[in-house]
Amino acid sequence: MTEFTFYTVPMSRGQISRWALHEAGADYEHRLLDWGSRPESYKAINPMNKVPALVHHHGDHDHVVTEAAAINHYLAETHPDKGLLPDAHEMAAYFRWLFFAAGPLEQAVLAKAMGWEVPEERSGMAGFGSFDLAVSAIDDWLKKNDFAAGSRFTMADTYVGSQIDWGLQFSTIGETPAFKAYVERIRQRPAYGEAKAIDAKLIEEASQE
Ligand SMILES: N[C@@H](CCC(=O)N[C@@H](CS)C(=O)NCC(=O)O)C(=O)O
């Protein structure tokens, strides 16, 4: 039995956590689910019925992690020798941008894609303020820093980077010189290529069925 079971759909946010599994060199097997139908039993793993989800088979018991950002950080914690965790000086930026990308940034991008307008006078109630404010906050950081936690790649980049990468690919985030350069840097990671190739092959196979 592998140490981890990874529940995913190839064309989904599961790609974010598959990248993390490969960065960590985790011993895992995947269980593929469909977009439309999920076995009822899956709700015991994720009551939200969403992917990705990770089950850590830990001795005589299992730990379940859901939420791509949490899964990715959990993998960094469980593989501490891989250099993916922040050091004491990187930790503030690491958590700041990891949580920012999973919260305000994702909400801002989704709200825009759905056409949900936040009235200007009520932007103080919205955690992301406004789309422009949220996107420029991370853009400004990446103008001055090569990576989420500072000058080197950490696990935070698998999540922050995926948000920017997908945003540029699907034009839900406008390209800026800092975003373009950041995405070029993270795409050079061998683990990014390995993980993306697995999902691309699964997507291709499914399209031929
Ligand atoms: N906040 C979750 C979002 C997960 C999510 O929305 N997953 C989508 C696929 S990208 C899903 O499973 N949707 C199917 C559904 O809700 O029925 C995370 O970051 O992991």
Image (cartoon, rainbow, N blue to C red):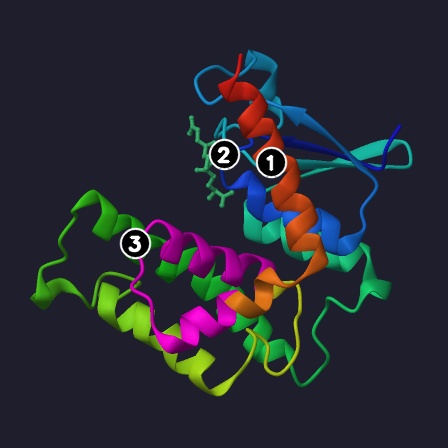
Confirm whether residue 53 shows in the render: no
The residue lying at 55 percent from left, 80 percent from top is 146
In the drawing, what numbered circle is on residue 199? 1
Q: Say which label, 2 or 1, has the lower sequence index.
A: 2
Asked if the residue at label 1 sits under 8 Å from ligand 1, the reply is: no
In the image, residue 132 lies at what x, y percent?
23, 69
Evaluate if marks 2 and 1 touch, with contact meaning CB atoms under 8 Å apart. Answer: yes
Sooner in the amino-acid sequence: mark 3 or mark 1: 3
Secondary structure beneath label 1: helix
Q: Which residue is mark 2?
A: 11
Q: Position of residue 104 (x, y in %)?
A: 36, 61
Residue type of the residue flagged with mark 3: Thr
Q: CA distance from mark 2 to mark 1?
A: 7 Å
> Considering only order in the chain, which callout, 2 or 3, is on the residue closer to the N terminus?
2
Give how far across and how far down residue 81 sits, in percent. 86, 65
Question: Can residue 194 be seen by looking at this rendering?
Answer: yes
User: Which segment did they paint magenta?
Assistant: 157-183
Report the Cα–Cα distance between label 3 and label 2.
Answer: 17 Å
Q: Are marks 3 and 2 in contact (CB under 8 Å)?
A: no
Give the quadrant of the N terminus: top right
